[in-house]
Image (cartoon, coloured by chain):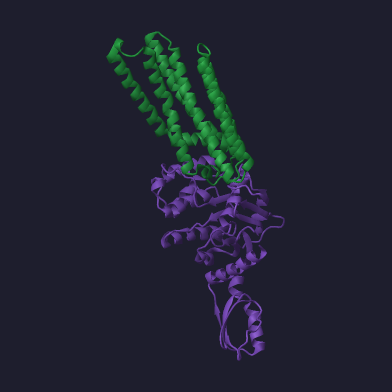
């Protein structure tokens, strides 16, 4: 993550962002994203990830709260805002009976700051055929086209809605490579939604977990890696001890297995209890995400 | 707004040219048939009217195709990659059928003009029929936009807008019916002006209504 100059506005600032639907409400959502940071929005279907990104991209008008990009209010009509933001959504509205190249030329007329040279380089880098009709493109190539379209004007903020969903492993790797190269310079901020959690380990600096329209937890990827552990141990007697940080506890007679979000505190407590055969193992991002979202579900339901 | 409109028309130019080409072809065949049957055939103003009608209707019918593609391909998502206000997006949507109507008017006027030059007669009745049918189709397209935006407003929980849209739709239909009936009853020189006025009033109301409803959308994802 790059150092942000003093007084420089964050890449994203959400202040109580709210969007209401008949059976769902997003927010109020408070979120800040520093320049140069990659934040993954993680959550099950219907958690509010796409709605958040649509509100940021100006495709949906929020019912409450504010949203800013580099200090600019989200305003689809504002040229400065459009220059800063590149968006890859589930659908991009391309002209299906035109070739990819013709679509890019049309976008060049619409998008401020568009660079044909950058578009050409990206298309080459992604091996995107420019002479094929968009309607005949595979899902992977359509994603590549959407990426080129989102990046050709050199935006500082990228909003990506499930960019790798439904892609075969080869195309997914290509797309992730490009995103990795873009974010490597530390100048681009990226907010992307995903439930392909293996992507998270590769790209994200931070994770924000959404459930039922609410932010359940936001944490650095390294912090999650450090703190979450699966610990098995033996304690004499039929007791379920109170252990700090534990979110799941299974016991068969004296054999225990716990999942903790504060491994250090749990281990200390186990030491003081005289636990034997203590074994600690790392957890994958997927496993951690499942635990956090399960917990978040309880929190959200209790609040309702 | 103009850029968005221009790109959409450019995307559909082959449809448009194909439609006009087909209309010219049909008009040619009609002319040949009328020429072949000669004096025993229908009156001359009918031939002129049919030719003009095809040329007027072609771009308007293509308009239905263009609007369907635009909705299917969720064009608003692409157009919003550039700096554009909801009002400009709405303007592009409303202007599209009006521009196509304009193309139809020019094409029909050309054929009727050539016809009057050849025959030395100005077929006023034919011009009224062609203008009336063209206006009717334009009005229907704009009413379609009002219906589409009323449904969108309902989906977006803008209930007052949805009710206003549907209310306006019903009032426009009643108004059209009243003016058409008045035109039919009037008989004589007032008939055509009343019928054209009915189309014009409803088309303007529908255009303004669609513009207002679209401009206040809160969701541009569909």
Residue B43 image offset from top left, x and y in percent: 36, 12
Chain identifier of the purple chain: A
Residue in the foreground of this view, choosing between A11 and A55: A55
Residue B206 image offset from top left, x and y in percent: 56, 31
Question: Which residue is located at x 54 percent, y 75 percent?
Answer: A283
- Quadrant including the N terminus of chain A: bottom right
Q: Is residue B62 above or below residue A16?
A: above
Question: Which residue is located at x 52 percent, y 65 percent?
Answer: A197
Q: Is residue B105 above or below residue B158?
A: above
Question: Which residue is located at x 58 percent, y 43 percent?
Answer: B154
Residue in the foreground of this view, choosing between A119 and B147: B147
Chain identifier of the green chain: B
Residue furthest left in the image: B36
Question: Which residue is located at x 33 percent, y 24 percent?
Answer: B25
* B176 with respect to B125 (left or right): right
Residue furthest bottom in the image: A236
- Indicate the quadrant where residue B26 lies: top left
Residue in the foreground of this view, choosing between A78 and A123: A78
- Quadrant including the C terminus of chain A: bottom right
Marker count (numbered): 0
Residue furthest top in the image: B120
Residue in the foreground of this view, choosing between B3 and A298: A298
Residue B191 visible in the snapshot: yes
Residue B167 image offset from top left, x and y in percent: 60, 34
Residue B3 visible in the snapshot: no
Residue A91 image offset from top left, x and y in percent: 49, 49
């Amino acid at each position: 993550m790059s150092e942000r100059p003093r007084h420089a506005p964050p890449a994203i600032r959400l202040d109580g962002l709210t969007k209401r639907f008949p059976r769902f409400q997003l927010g109020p959502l408070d979120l800040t994203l520093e320049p140069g940071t990659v934040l993954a929005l993680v959550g099950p279907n219907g958690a509010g990830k796409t709605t958040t990104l649509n509100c940021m991209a100006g495709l949906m008008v929020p019912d409450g709260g504010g949203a800013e990009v580099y200090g600019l209010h989200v305003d689809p009509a504002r040229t400065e805002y459009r220059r800063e933001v590149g968006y890859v959504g589930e659908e991009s509205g391309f002209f299906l009976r035109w070739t990819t190249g013709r679509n890019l030329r049309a976008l060049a007329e619409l998008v401020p700051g568009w660079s044909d040279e950058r578009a050409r380089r990206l298309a080459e880098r992604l091996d995107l055929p420019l002479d094929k009709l968009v309607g005949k493109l595979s899902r992977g190539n359509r994603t590549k086209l959407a990426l080129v379209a989102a990046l050709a004007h050199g935006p500082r903020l990228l909003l990506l809605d499930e960019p790798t969903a439904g892609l075969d492993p080869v195309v997914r790797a290509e797309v992730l490579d490009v995103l990795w190269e873009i974010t490597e310079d530390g100048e681009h901020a990226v907010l992307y939604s995903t439930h392909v959690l293996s992507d998270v380990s590769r790209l994200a600096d931070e994770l924000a977990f959404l459930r039922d329209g609410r932010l359940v937890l936001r944490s650095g990827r390294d912090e999650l890696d450090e703190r979450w552990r699966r610990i098995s141990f033996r304690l004499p007697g039929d007791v379920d001890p109170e252990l700090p940080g534990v979110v799941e506890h299974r016991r068969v007679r004296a054999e225990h297995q716990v999942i903790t979000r504060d491994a250090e505190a749990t281990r200390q407590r186990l030491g003081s209890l005289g636990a034997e055969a203590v074994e600690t193992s790392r957890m994958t991002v997927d496993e951690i995400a499942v635990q956090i979202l399960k917990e978040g579900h309880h929190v959200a339901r209790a609040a309702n | 707004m103009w850029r968005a409109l221009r790109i959409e028309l450019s995307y559909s130019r082959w449809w448009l040219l194909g439609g006009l080409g087909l209309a010219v072809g049909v008009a040619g065949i009609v002319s040949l048939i009328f020429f072949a049957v000669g004096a025993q055939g229908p009156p001359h103003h009918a031939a002129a009217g049919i030719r003009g009608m095809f040329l007027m209707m072609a771009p308007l019918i293509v308009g239905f195709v263009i609007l369907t593609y635009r909705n299917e391909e969720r064009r608003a998502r692409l157009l919003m990659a550039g700096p554009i206000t909801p009002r400009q997006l709405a303007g592009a949507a409303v202007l599209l059928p009006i521009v196509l109507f304009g193309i139809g008017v020019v094409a029909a006027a050309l054929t009727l003009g050539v016809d009057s030059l050849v025959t030395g007669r100005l077929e006023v009745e034919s011009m009224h029929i062609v203008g009336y049918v063209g206006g009717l189709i334009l009005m229907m397209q704009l009413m379609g936009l009002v219906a589409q935006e009323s449904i969108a407003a309902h989906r977006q929980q803008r209930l007052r807008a949805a009710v206003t849209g549907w209310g306006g739709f019903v009032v426009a239909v009643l108004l059209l019916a009243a003016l058409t009936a008045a035109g039919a009853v009037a008989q004589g020189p007032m008939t055509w002006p009343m019928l054209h006025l009915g189309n014009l009033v409803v088309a303007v109301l529908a255009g303004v209504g669609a513009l207002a409803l679209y401009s206040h959308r809160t969701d541009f994802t569909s």
